[in-house]
């Protein structure tokens, strides 16, 4: 799918709805992209990814209400 072919307004609305419904979906999408692109390949990188995931989850938990209000 090419983003240039998708109406950006519709795309933004879909992303907002995903965040409102379940912010874990967004995290799973990021994780899937990282795996597909083999961004994380070593044990050291795996630990870095886990650290980043924890940080992201903490931010999502901390700012969940803000994300919902912005959407």
Image: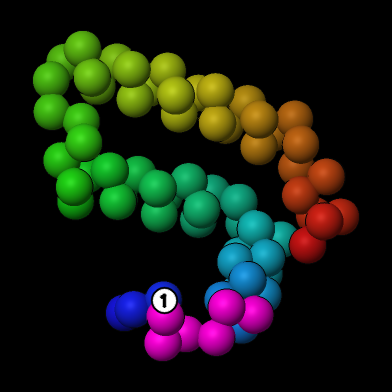
Q: Residue at x 20, y 30 (%)?
A: 40
Spot the residue most to the front: 4
Given residues 37 and 19, the one toward you in this image is 37
Residue 13 lies in quadrant: bottom right
Q: Does any portion of residue 34 appear in the rendered image? A: yes
Determine crowd level at label 1: few under 14, some 14-19, many 20+ residues with C-alpha closer than 10 A.
few
* Dominant secondary structure (helix, strand or loop) of the stretch shown in magenta: helix
Q: Quadrant of the N terminus?
A: bottom left
Given residues 11 and 27, the one toward you in this image is 11
Query: Viewed as shown, does residue 50 lie left or right of 11?
Result: left
Residue 38 lies in quadrant: top left
Q: Residue 61: give x, y in percent of width and height.
A: 69, 33
Spot the residue most to the top: 44
Q: Residue at x 76, y 49 (%)?
A: 67
Q: Residue at x 57, y 78 (%)?
A: 8
- Write down the residue under mark 1: 3
Query: Which span of residues is magenta-colored?
Result: 4-9
Q: Quadrant of the C terminus?
A: bottom right
Q: Residue at x 51, y 53 (%)?
A: 26
Q: Is residue 24 magenta?
A: no
Instruction: Give the SS element for disc 1.
Output: helix
Q: Residue 35: give x, y in percent of width and height.
A: 22, 44
Q: Residue 63: give x, y in percent of width and height.
A: 76, 36
């Amino acid at each position: 799918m090419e983003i240039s072919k998708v109406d950006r307004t519709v795309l933004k609305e879909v992303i907002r709805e995903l965040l409102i419904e379940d912010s874990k979906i967004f995290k799973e999408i990021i994780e899937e992209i990282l795996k597909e692109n083999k961004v994380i390949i070593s044990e050291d990188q795996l630990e870095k990814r886990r650290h980043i995931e924890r940080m992201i989850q903490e931010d999502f938990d901390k700012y969940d209400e803000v994300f919902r209000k912005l959407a």
